[in-house]
């Protein structure tokens, strides 16, 4: 089935292996990953308070906050979130 039809039916796929803040349960439903959700909330809070994506990424790297892949944070990663 094409992705548009699945979307119209409310069926869609999300790659949770690189979806910060969520995991899937045994039934495939999204559940909040509280440890990662704290990072997502902080990104939004700091961005909305005026910090730029480059500054947020730099601070996360200094604080050794992990990404979903274990790589370094980049400003583009922050913007995608």
Image: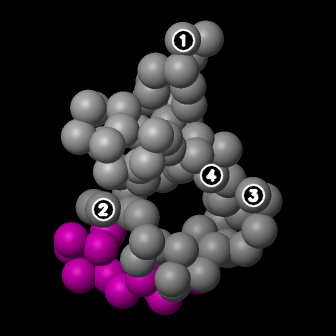
**Mark 1 neighbour class, 10 Å CA radius: few under 14, some 14 to 19, many 20 or more:** few
Residue 33, given in percent of the width and then of the height, sits at: 52, 31
**Mark 4 neighbour class, 10 Å CA radius: few under 14, some 14 to 19, many 20 or more:** few
Which label number is shown at residue 74?
Answer: none
Query: What separation in Å lies between label 4 and label 3 (alpha carbons)?
Result: 7 Å
Residues at marks 4 and 1 touching, judged by CB atoms closer than 8 Å: no
Residue at image coords 72%, 74% = 72
**Closer to the camera, 54 or 1?**
1
For marks 3 and 2 on the same chain, the one whose residue lies earlier in the sequence: 2
Foreground mark, 4 or 3, reads 4
Which label number is shown at residue 69?
Answer: 3
Residue at image coords 78%, 59% = 70
Q: Is residue 7 left or right of residue 78?
A: left
Is 76 part of what is drawn in magenta? no
Question: In what element is the residue under mark 4?
Answer: helix
Residue 36 seen from this side: no
Rendered position, 36 above or below 29: below
Quarter of the image with the C terminus is bottom left
Residues at marks 4 and 3 touching, judged by CB atoms closer than 8 Å: yes
Residue at image coords 36%, 38% = 6
Query: What separation in Å lies between label 3 and label 2 (alpha carbons)?
Result: 20 Å
Foreground mark, 4 or 1, reads 1
Q: Is residue 57 left or right of residue 5?
A: right
Give the residue number, with chain letter if any, for mark 1: 27
**Mark 2 neighbour class, 10 Å CA radius: few under 14, some 14 to 19, many 20 or more:** some
Question: In what element is the residue under mark 1?
Answer: loop
Q: Is residue 10 left or right of residue 53?
A: left
**Closer to the camera, 9 or 50?**
9
Give the residue number, with chain letter if any, for mark 4: 18
- Provide the residue span drawn in magenta: 46-59
Query: What separation in Å lies between label 4 and label 1 (alpha carbons)?
Result: 18 Å
């Amino acid at each position: 089935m094409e992705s548009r039809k699945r979307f119209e039916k409310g069926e869609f796929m999300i790659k949770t292996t690189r979806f910060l803040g969520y995991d899937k349960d045994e039934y495939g439903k999204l559940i909040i990953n509280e440890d990662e959700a704290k990072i997502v909330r902080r990104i939004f809070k700091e961005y909305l308070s005026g910090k730029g994506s480059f500054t947020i990424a730099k601070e996360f790297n200094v604080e050794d906050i992990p990404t979903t892949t274990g790589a370094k944070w980049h400003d583009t990663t922050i913007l995608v979130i």
